[in-house]
Image (spheres, rainbow, N blue to C red):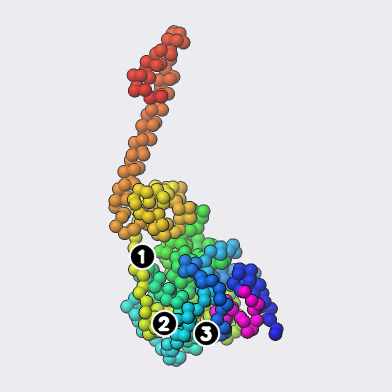
Amino acid sequence: MRISVRWFLVSVALLSNGYLARPVTAETEPEALSAWTGEPSAEPPALAPTDDAGIGASLAPAYDDGAAPTSEAGAATEAAPTPEVDLWAEFYTSPAPPALAKTEPTRAPVEPTPAKPSPAVTTAASTYKVQQNDTVQRFLDQFQTGYRRAVVERWLTRSGRFLPMILEVFRQKGLPEELVFTAMIESGFDPVAVSRAGAKGLWQFMAPTARQYGLRVDRWLDERLDPEKSTVAAANYLKDLYTTFGSWDLVQAAYNAGETKVIRAIKGTGARDFWGLTQSRLLRDETKNYVPAIHAVTLIGQEPEQYGFAVTPDEPLSYERITVPRGTTLKHVAGLSGIPLEELVRLNSELRMKQTPPDSPYQLKVPLGTGPSLQEGLEREIENRKAAAASRLAERASKKKSHHSVVPHRSSSTKARVSRTRDTDQGGFR
């Protein structure tokens, strides 16, 4: 049986990462390949289950023209890989739970119909039109069956922590609220997701674009991992993309592939809408499937019960900020406040060294209700340290004055006696 060059190269890459235990052929193509090509595949080989803590984003296109997309953002790629977690690995490394594998999908009408609003996400006067065409339906079917269903359930559960914050930011920026589900495909609502290419956070920003949109990324801070700040940056980026393309489907395609790729496809085909571009070979299969996948999870996210998902979302993330001195360690704050170190690390995952930057005071996130007492304790500690420092300075000044006082016309022994007497008179500061 012939093996295509593309399958062979991807097979080698997957084997090097331990994802495949057998050769890739047209009959044994793993979900790693078919998840984004839209072609059916057999269940993946039985591998060890992927722990939910290891979910991230692995939409990492290889730019065949050797160039990254404009401003290197929007696509989940980066030059220096950091293979910490992998979102789409859930679709091809997790064995299908037996109880879920037989679940039948709930089919919605194929003709485009407007999605009904949910209490969390409204569609009033929205410029985002959710489609229900054959491609979207294919993803709806996939997301409702087998082990993929368990993955989507985790996404829906985890979304409760961040949806209120994201919705508030998008409303302030004037963005369609349906765009919140872009983060579900990007990261599975995992705020510390890291792709194999190094894109990070809820919105899978690349470092250069993160900096372009006001996020600090250096040895001390990586604000791509700050859910609120990265959401503001993502909202601004999405608005800029809409200014360029005037279509939310094209915006999402550019978020995945990069502006340059989408502009090139538009120029090459003359098509002005995403669905027209999918008929050409100028967009990779990954991007062709990325947008309908978002439409599918948007439909599920708006009405999970209609698609057979009965989940209880996590409680919204809540915290308050306090000002701490520069260079404050999370361990010190934990010891002072009694807050578990793990909780402080989770709330402040952008602190790469588990310590605030040494260049300025920092707004630290702490559990709701702990801020006032902790702020008071820190300020009291600062005052105590200032007092101790002033005392040490006074002691040093006293020592310097007593040891360097010279009485004219006296012998060395007399000078020594005078010095010792003055030391005793100053309280013994040495």
Q: Which one is in front, 135 or 175?
A: 135
Read off the residue under disc 1.
Answer: 317
* Residue 8 image point, x, y percent: 67, 77
Read off the residue under disc 2.
Answer: 299
* Residue 407 image point, x, y percent: 42, 12
* Residue 214 image point, x, y percent: 46, 60
The three-letter code of the residue at mark 3 reads: Trp
> Callout 3: few (<14), some (14-19), or many (20+) C-alpha neighbours within 10 Å?
some
Q: Quadrant of the N terminus?
A: bottom right
Residue 15 image-quadrant placement: bottom right
The three-letter code of the residue at mark 1 reads: Leu
Q: Earlier in the sequence, mark 1 or mark 3?
A: 3
* Residue 79 image point, x, y percent: 60, 64
SS type, badge 1:
loop
Q: Quadrant of the C terminus?
A: top left
Q: Which one is in front, 20 or 196?
A: 20
